[in-house]
């Protein structure tokens, strides 16, 4: 089997993966004290956390879409057990 990483810009792939990792870290850090959905809706601080979390989820979805594009649809296909199509449209989810 040919190495799928040889067909595209490894540095760009690394940068996209770093963006995804950073967004995940921000979500984890900013929501560590959120225990119920009410924590997002009780006050302005919670609403701001929800907005920030939503923006990071959108960024993750866009990054995964870009990752798939720059890898010519080869990288994500190596992980067929993960439901990638459920992540791509995350930018259109509603709160």
Image: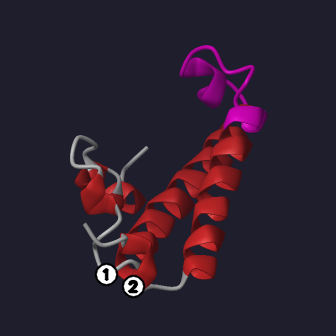
Specify the quadrant that holds the C terminus. top left
User: Is residue 60 toward the left or the right of residue 76 in the image?
Assistant: right
Query: Which residue sits at x=44%, y=64%?
Result: 64
Is residue 48 shown left or right of residue 92? right
**What residue is pinned by disc 1?**
72
Report the label total. Answer: 2
The quadrant in which the N terminus is found is bottom left
The reply, left or right, for residue 86 in relation to residue 53 is left
* Residue 4 placement: quadrant: bottom left
Of residues 77 and 24, which is closer to you in this image? 77
- Local crowd size for mark 1, using a 10 Å CA cut-off: few (<14), some (14–19), many (≥20): some
Nearer to the camera, 43 or 84: 84
Sequence order check: which comes first, mark 2 or mark 1?
Answer: 2
Q: Which residues are magenta?
A: 28-45
Residue 2 covered by magenta stretch? no
Label 2 close to label 1 by CB (< 8 Å): yes
Bin the neighbour count of mark 2 within 10 Å (Cα to Cα): few under 14, some 14-19, many 20 and up: few
Q: Secondary structure at mark 2?
A: helix
Q: Position of residue 39 (x, y in %)?
A: 65, 22
Q: Is residue 86 above or below residue 77?
A: above
Q: Mark 1: which secondary structure?
A: loop
- In the picture of the structure, the residue carrying the numbered disc 2 is 7
Could you say which disc has been placed on residue 19 in the image?
Answer: none
**For residue 71, above or below residue 27:** below
**Relative to 14, residue 58 above or below:** above
Residue at coordinates 23% horizontally, 41% vertically from top-left? 81
Q: Nearer the viewer, residue 69 or 9?
A: 9
- What is the x, y in percent for residue 49? 70, 40
Which residue is outermost to the top?
Answer: 35
């Amino acid at each position: 089997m040919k190495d799928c990483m040889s067909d595209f810009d490894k540095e760009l792939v690394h940068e996209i993966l770093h963006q995804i990792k950073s967004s995940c870290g921000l979500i984890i850090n900013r929501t560590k004290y959120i225990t119920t959905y009410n924590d997002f809706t009780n006050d302005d601080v919670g609403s701001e956390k929800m907005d920030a979390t939503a923006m990071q989820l959108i960024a993750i979805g866009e990054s995964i879409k870009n990752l798939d594009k720059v890898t010519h649809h080869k990288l994500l296909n190596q992980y067929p057990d993960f439901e990638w199509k459920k992540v791509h449209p995350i930018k259109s989810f509603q709160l």
